Structure formats: C-alpha cells, structure tokens
Amino acid sequence: MSTATPLTKPVDDQPSDRGLSAAEIKRLKFQADTDQLVAAFNKDQLKLSNVDWVVTLFLIGVHVGALFAFMPMFFSWTGVAVCLALHWATCSIGICLGYHRYLAHKSMKLRAPAEFVAMACGCLSGEGSPLTWAATHRLHHQKSDQDGDPHSPIVVNGAWSHILWLFPKRTTESSRILYRRYVPELVDRPMLQFFEKTFALWLWGGGLVLLAAGWAIGGWQMGASLVVWGMCVRMVAAYHSTWFVNSATHLWGYRNYDTRDHSRNLWWVAILAYGEGWHNNHHAHPAVAPAGHKWWEFDITWWSIKALRAVGLAYDVKDKLPVGRAADESDQESDMMEKAVAGVA
C-alpha cells in the first residue's frame, strides 16, 4: 500500500484557478477530496497521536464487560434471552437490513414505521450513526481491495480490516467529504438527521434501560446481568460477526461471480452475520436484496425483508436473482466524477 497522501498540498503545489475552466476546477477539487479520503483511511493514520480514544475506550470497555459473563453471579437465563433477542434486532434488522441493504444499497423502500425501527436498532448496535455507516460502506464498494478501501485485508492485513481501521481519528473535513461524496441524497432527510443527532443517546440509553429493567425485575444483580449479557456480550458478538464480513470474506471462501475484488462467500460468516457472509454475491450485485443466491445460501435477513413486504412495510424490493458469473459492477468512480464535474455531487 502506498504511503499516506498529505491531507493538504504544500502552498507552492496548490493549483491556481487562473486560466482554468469551471469543469477543470471541479475536477481538481474532486481529486483533492479523493486524496484526502484516501489519506483519512490509510493505515499510517493509526498512531498513538491520532487514536480516537472515544471509540477505542468504548470498544475496550464492552469487551471487558463481556468477560463478566464468565462470572456465575452475572449469569441469568433472562440475560441470555435478552442478549439473543437484541443481537438479532440490532445486527440483522438494524445493520444488515436497515443500514446495509436499505440505506447503503437501496435494495428496497421502507415505510416510516419500519424505517424508524430499523434505524433505531442500527443505533443500538453501536456500529456508528446511519449516515457514517452507509457512506463508509459505499466507499468500501467503490474502492474494494484497492487503495482507499477503509478496511481491506488485501491492501493491508486481516487485523486492520477486522478491527484496527476503527481506531484512527478522522478529521471533520474528511467526514464532510465522505458525506457529500457518498450519501448526498440522504444527508437532509429529517429522520436520518434525527438519528444522527441522537445516536449517542440511543446507545447509552439502551444500557440504562437494561439496567433499570433488570433492577425492577430482580434487584441490582439482575440489572447487572442484563447489562453484561444484553449490552456487552451482545455487542461484542455482533461486532465480530460484522467485522468478519470485512476481513474473513475477502480472504477465504468460494466465488459465484467474477468480481474485480477478492470478495468470497463464506458459510460460517453467513450464519454469524445473518446472511451477510455471502459476500461475493453481494459485491457482484450490491443492490439485490437477497444475499444468498443459491438454494443452500442461508439468509435470515432476507426472511425479514419478505415478512415486511408481506405486510406492506417494505416495497419496491429488488429481488431478481442474476444469471451467470458476470458481476453487475458499474464504474462508480467515473459516475461520481461526472456528477462532480457537472456540479451534482
């Protein structure tokens, strides 16, 4: 992987607008923004002086909290049940259905009640706000296994793609570029703005609700049990199942389609991540709602989408399965360049 691109060019290298056409100026601005995004997600950003301590300490905290599950005093069957229910709700409904297939890829449309529940579950997962998740994922698809991919095990290594890419601090400017470039049609939607502003409240509020509910049911010990199992164990399991999609499914497995990247289908990740492990299928045809394209490719999230469609909460579902090995990969970067030059993006 190349060394990090400087976030700003030296003064002497800054292009002058004198004599340039409007289209050329926009093209240069587009390239400067691209260079800044590539630098923001470069492995060289991971250094002690640039650690995002809020993210890092939170991830360390939930992992340490999950270790208390091995202490008998914090075990309860109620806690286990809450853990399993919230794991499905936050990981399958929140991340896989809501953030991923609905927001990032527009595989379906959701009516307001279903959209609200999916976004709330996504926030409760602790995997980031809706716009940040969708924008980063679209960047991953555009740059998959190339320089600029936020989490490629091919460009960097498995540890980086699995977890280390989360630790560097990104600048406000790089986040602004990420939003403007990759989710321009989403940023002004009122419901998404609501969840962007209240993301932290959902995350911490969920833990307080578990503590209060457990305390009301069976005192402080039950409250602690629900926090340990319903928040810490559940989040750690959901985190790693999601991260295995970033890491393992670009390293091991089989391929149904001839994609430009190294994406693979990996059965055990598909089980852990509610169907997301059929990653080669997804990278070949990102907008298709079902991730499993063969009869044996198990996809629980697709069952939920079909259920929502049956009751009218999901519609315009893109469910036509492709034929053959060809991948439907549009040249996203060229398309975005054209929009930028035209002043659309």
Image: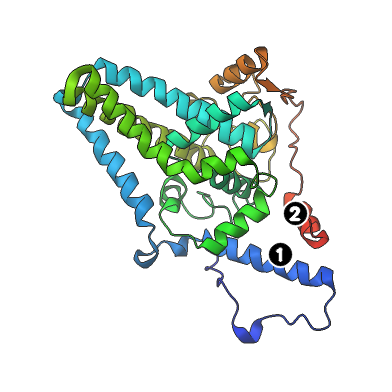
Query: SS for tag 2?
Result: helix
Density class for disc 1 (Cα within 10 Å; few <14, some 14-19, many ≥20) is some
Three-letter amino acid code at the position of disc 1: Phe
Q: At 30% across and 46% down in the image, what residue appears? A: 60
Tell me the number on the disc at residue 192.
none
Instruction: Give the mark nearest the N terminus, 1 or 2.
Output: 1
Whether residue 133 is situated above or below residue 237 in the rendered picture: below
- Judging by the rendered image, the residue that carries numbered circle 1 is 30
Q: Is residue 337 left or right of residue 221?
A: right
Label 1–label 2 contact, CB within 8 A:
yes
Q: At 66% across and 37% down in the image, what residue appears? A: 105
Q: At 44% across and 45% down in the image, what residue appears? A: 162
Q: At 66% across and 23% down in the image, what residue appears? A: 293
Whether residue 218 is situated above or below residue 130 in the rendered picture: above
Density class for disc 2 (Cα within 10 Å; few <14, some 14-19, many ≥20) is some
Tell me the number on the disc at residue 336.
2
Q: Is residue 32 left or right of residue 243?
A: right
